[in-house]
């Protein structure tokens, strides 16, 4: 499974990339939210892990770009956020392309269960 991770937290990006690589995934991490949609179009991953709050372009904007392009509109997204509560989760679930939501901090097990859940649905 090829996964693109978009997060401006370099430490988390590295940690997630290591964990997913250890699970046998091909991982393409990027902290550049401005170039993320273009990189995803080129890569054509099976899944995108997308942080919602980033400095230059947020996850809402990146997801909208992906949804607007026919070649990326069907790529499933798991959004990650440390700024929304469980009660506000519905806001994140309405982002185009979002199949799952991970609220930070999340466990490795929770992340992998959501990755596998999205994979099973494909």
Image (cartoon, helix red, strand yellow):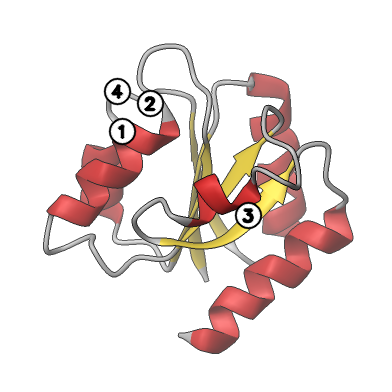
Mark 1 sits on what residue?
A: 61
Q: Is 77 placed above or below 120 here?
A: above
Q: Position of residue 82 (x, y in %)?
A: 71, 30
- Tell me where residue 9 appears, x and y as whole percent: 63, 21
Image quadrant in which the C terminus is located: bottom left
Q: In whole angstroms, how far apart are the C-alphas of marks 3 and 2? A: 18 Å
The reply to whether discs 2 and 1 touch (Cβ–Cβ < 8 Å) is yes
User: How many residues crowd mark 4 within 10 Å: few (<14), some (14–19), many (20+)?
Assistant: some
Examine the rendered structure and indicate whether residue 68 appears above or below residue 32. Answer: below
User: Which of the 4 quarters of the picture holds residue 45?
Assistant: bottom left
* Residues at discs 1 and 3 in contact (Cβ within 8 Å): no
Q: Earlier in the sequence, mark 1 or mark 3?
A: 1
Which of the two residues, 93 or 81, is positioned nearer the viewer here? 93
| Label placed on residue 33 | 2
Give the CA separation, mark 1 to mark 4.
9 Å
Residue matched to label 4: 34
Give the residue number, with chain letter if any, for mark 3: 101
| Residue 31 seen in this snapshot | yes
Element assignment for label 4? loop
Which residue is at 34% across, 65% downward?
75
Q: In the rendered view, does 105 fall on the left or right side of 42?
A: right
Q: Real-space Cα distance between discs 4 and 3?
A: 22 Å
Q: Secondary structure at mark 3?
A: strand
Q: Which mark is residue 99?
A: none
From the image, state whether disc 3 or disc 2 is nearer to you.
Answer: 3
Residue placed furthest toward the top:
55
Residue 33 drawn at (x, y percent)? 38, 26
Number of other residues with Cα within 10 Å of mark 1, as a class: few under 14, some 14 to 19, many 20 or more = some
Contact check, label 4 and label 2, Cβ < 8 Å: yes
Would residue 30 be found to the left or right of residue 18 on screen?
Answer: left
User: How far is mark 2 from mark 1, CA to CA?
Assistant: 9 Å
Mark 1 and mark 4 lie on one chain; the one further toward the N terminus is 4
């Amino acid at each position: 499974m090829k996964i693109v991770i978009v997060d401006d937290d370099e430490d988390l990006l590295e940690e997630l990339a290591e964990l997913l690589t250890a699970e046998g995934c091909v991982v393409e991490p990027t902290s550049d939210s401005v170039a993320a949609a273009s990189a995803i179009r080129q890569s054509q991953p099976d899944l995108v892990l997308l942080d919602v709050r980033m400095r230059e372009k947020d996850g809402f904007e990146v997801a909208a770009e992906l949804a607007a392009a026919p070649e990326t509109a069907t790529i499933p997204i798991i959004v990650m956020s440390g700024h929304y509560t469980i009660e506000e989760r519905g806001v994140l679930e309405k982002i185009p392309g979002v199949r799952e939501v991970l609220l930070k901090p999340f466990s490795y097990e929770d992340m992998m269960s959501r990755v596998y859940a999205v994979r099973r649905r494909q």
